[in-house]
Image: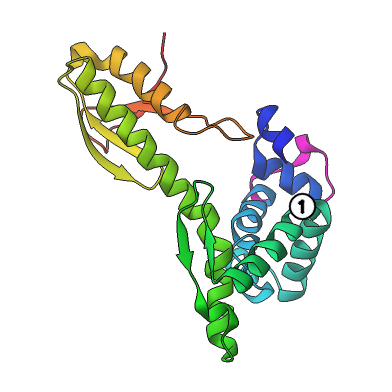
Amino acid sequence: MIETFHQNIDIHTRTAAQIFHVPLDQVDSELRRRAKAVNFGIIYGISDFGLSRDTGVSRKEARRYIDNYLDSYPGVKQYMEDIVKFGQQHGYVETYLKRRRYLPDLNAKNKMQQAFARRMALNTPIQGTSADIIKLAMIKVFDQLKERELQAKLLLQVHDELVLEVPLNEVDEVAELLKDCMENACVLKVPLEVSLNIGRNWYDMVDYCLS
């Protein structure tokens, strides 16, 4: 999976190829869509019922997707088991940057409470790390804008996106520093890649390439 990112191969296409047993170049948009639901769903503890609902396939087929995925990526299954076990033993789980979320219900007698806490245990290290990284990026961007005495302003953070208001004469410089700050916000085993868009307003954003 790590090598997929280093080879700049779309992770959902690679997952589709592995769990549906087809060559990469034969993965169509529908198979990719299903694989994307699998990629995002399984690591958050999705059930065959939930995956069936999200993809429109039968529960039996959804179960087959999940089983094929976990067979293809045994490290993911091990991670899921390890993170829940860690949470049960310590009462919390943590992000890559060591921010904690306490989950006492991992050991609750009520099975519904325990199941919800288990999903949070799987979700937090991933979503929480993503939140950590974008916040580090925001700090870097703010500091760079201030240090260079630029007029551009950081307006919004929306999930993994940053929205800035930039004078036309600063567009190239701000685009370059923004890409650098976001892609180097954190060192991981896989590269962080950023795409840039520009427009007179958020609605009109179009792809922007650095020259």
Extreme-front residue of the structure:
90
- In this figure, which colouring scheme has been used for the structure? rainbow
Q: Amino acid at mark 1?
A: Gly
| Disc 1: CA contacts within 10 A as few (<14), some (14-19) or many (>=20) | few
**Quadrant of the rendered structure where residue 191 is?**
top right
Percent position of residue 36, x then y = 62, 52
Q: Circle 1 sits on which residue?
A: 75
Q: For residue 34, which quarter of the picture?
A: bottom right
Q: Position of residue 86 (x, y in %)?
A: 64, 65
The answer to whether any part of residue 65 appears in the image is yes
**SS at circle 1:** helix
| Image vertical order of residue 165 relative to residue 16, above or below | above
Quadrant containing the N terminus in the rendered view: top right
Asked if residue 61 is among those painted magenta in the image, a careful observer would answer no
Quadrant containing the C terminus in the rendered view: top left
Task: State the residue in front, 210 or 206.
Answer: 210
> Left or right: 17 with respect to 143?
right
Q: Is residue 154 left or right of residue 182?
A: left
Instruction: Tell me the quarter of the picture where residue 55 sits.
Output: bottom right
Q: Is residue 25 inside the magenta stretch?
A: yes
Q: Is residue 20 visible?
A: no
Decide: is 211 above or below 39: above
Q: In the rendered image of this protein, does residue 103 appear above or below residue 68?
A: below
The answer to whether residue 31 is left or right of residue 117 is right
Residue positioned most to the top = 211
Residue name at image x 19 percent, y 11 percent:
169
**Among all residues in the image, which is located at the extreme bottom?**
110
> Residue 125 at x, y = what percent?
54, 55
Find the magenta span and give its range.
21-30
Q: State whether residue 30 is above or below residue 88.
A: above
Query: What percent of the width, then of the height, locates residue 18?
Result: 80, 47
